[in-house]
Amino acid sequence: MTESPPDRIIPDRLENPWRTALMSWPTLLLLVAICLFIVNSLASPYFLSPWSLSDATFNFTERAIIALAMALLIISGEIDLSVAAIMALASTMMGLALQFGAGTPALVLIGLATGVLCGVFNGFLVTKLGLPSIVVTIGTMSFFRGVSFIVLGDQAFKGYPESFAFFGQGYVWWVISFEFVLFLAMAVVFYLLLHRTSFGRKVFVIGNNPVAAEFSGVRVARVKFILFCLTGLMSGIAAILLTSRLGSTRPSIALGMELEVITMVVLGGVSILGGAGSIQGVVLAAFIMGLVTFGLGLLNVPGIVMSIFIGALLIFVIALPIVFRMIRERRS
């Protein structure tokens, strides 16, 4: 007589989907965001004002728009450290065109085109020449920012038309800013792109094993090139928003913003090694960083303290999974 097969063991994550959802990283980020909202409301009597909450969105929307594209790039196993410099160069090109009488439509097109061209340049060096993305984008970070300093020097471009100011200062309805609506719309687009299309599945496959993806018929270089172009485009959009909000162009614009963008992405649960992550997590991380920076601003905390906090947060988030993995290995 043959023995009956043993009962199949079903993992807990298949038996209890609700438990898996509650223990997920986005759920933890949502709880942190709720706690920060409560703490800020108790710390400052001005926080719950509708206009204060609207102003809080300006603290993260430009960075978060870039973080959406950066998330896909990091999931694929690459990185772009030149995004803030691309913003500076795009803003400089718009300011230069302004001196020759360019109107709002032309300024927007120039900002978008500059961002895309910078992304094309980065993508070409990485995908065609096979150079490491971290080395390439460190170099282009200095190159793009250097061009801005050469063109502007100690000066600043001002006098943007009133119609251009709407992108960074306008409101769609009551206290709902155009920047915030644009960010939410882009978040939906990137969610569908990453989690509901074959292109998004290719991004995950490439991040997990680019060699296997290549042998499976995925055009790895082409996908990565598109992601660099997409990151450049989002940087151009962010440059338009930031320039419009400030009303001027300086070579130091967006200085150090790449650190905040990467912190948003990693805090959102995107693995710095590639192959894992979600847009939901990045969106929640953007809200958390916006709440933190705005709350500290209401308490008159100096900007250097905020920089220290962001740097420490980045180190903590990168080290946390490694520490958990070491603990699990010791227990097993």
Image (cartoon, rainbow, N blue to C red):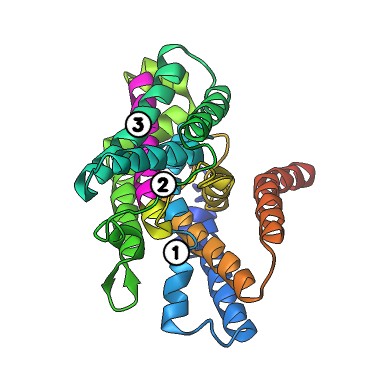
Asked whether 115 or 131 is in front, the reply is: 115
Counting the numbered discs, the total is: 3
Disc 1, SS = loop
Going by the image, does 128 lie left or right of 43? left
The amino acid on which the numbered mark 1 sits, given as a three-letter code, is: Phe
Residue 211: x percent and y percent?
Answer: 46, 18
Q: CA distance from mark 3 to mark 1?
A: 25 Å
Q: Residue at x 38, y 19 (%)?
A: 221
The location of residue 8, given as percent across then percent down, is: 49, 47
State the SS at label 3: helix
Res. 3 in view: no
What's the amino acid at mark 2?
A: Phe
- Residue to which mark 3 is pinned: 229
Residue 263 location in percent, x, y? Answer: 58, 49
User: Mark 2 or mark 3: which is in front?
Assistant: 2
Q: Tag 1: Cα neighbours inside 10 Å, few (<14), some, or many (≥20)?
A: many
Residue ranking furthest to the right: 330
Q: Between marks 2 and 1, how big is the CA–CA gap?
A: 22 Å
Would you place residue 307 above or below residue 287 in this image?
above
Residue 10 position, x and y percent, is: 50, 51
Q: Secondary structure at mark 2?
A: loop
Which callout, 3 or 1, points at the residue further toward the start of the chain?
Answer: 1
Left or right for 318, reference 80: right
Query: Does the magenta portion include 233?
Result: yes
Q: Earlier in the sequence, mark 2 or mark 3?
A: 2
* Range drawn in magenta: 221-240
